[in-house]
Amino acid sequence: MELYGTYLSYLIKKKLQTANKALSVRELALLIHIYETRREQYNLERRVRASIIKLLENKIISLEPHRMGQKNIFVTKYKINGGQKSIGQAQGL
């Protein structure tokens, strides 16, 4: 199963809407699809990161840094912006 482009962005947005908390790229990729090999899963994570960048540019989602144990280690997690109904509305269409 190959997930690319706007369909992947749609899946990311839907997963973030249903989640009660902010999710990392790895968590999002695992929720969307689990591949058999680590390489395929990593490639999906790369595509998820690329889609997240586009969603961040359109202000559909926002990022939250989360501290992991020590003071200098952070994991970036993403959540849906409140008040956004659709991708088209966020882009002004």
Image (cartoon, rainbow, N blue to C red):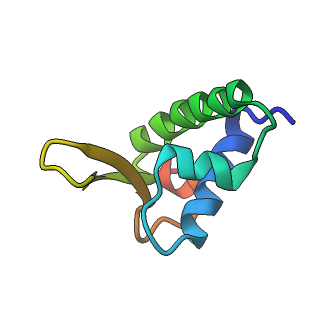
Identify the residue at the far bottom of this view: 20
Residue at position x 69%, y 39% in the image: 6
Horizontally, residue 79 falls left or right of residue 88, namely: left
Q: Nearer the viewer, residue 92 or 4?
A: 4
Residue 18 x/y as whole percent: 60, 71
Give the farthest residue toward the left: 71
Viewer-closest of 10 and 24: 24
Outermost residue toward the front?
Answer: 69
Location of residue 66 by image quarter = bottom left
The quadrant of the image that shows the N terminus is top right
Note whether 45 is above or below 9 in the view shown: above
Outermost residue to the right: 1
Count how many numbered circles sit on residues in the image: 0
Give x and y (percent) for residue 35. Answer: 78, 39
Above or below: residue 78 compared with residue 36: below
* Quadrant hosting residue 36: top right
Q: Position of residue 82 (x, y in %)?
A: 40, 70
Percent x, y of residue 5: 69, 33
Which image quadrant for residue 15? bottom right
Image point (45%, 35%), residue name: 53
Residue toward you, 91 or 53: 53
Please report the residue visible at 69 percent of the width from the left and 42 percent of the height from the top.
8
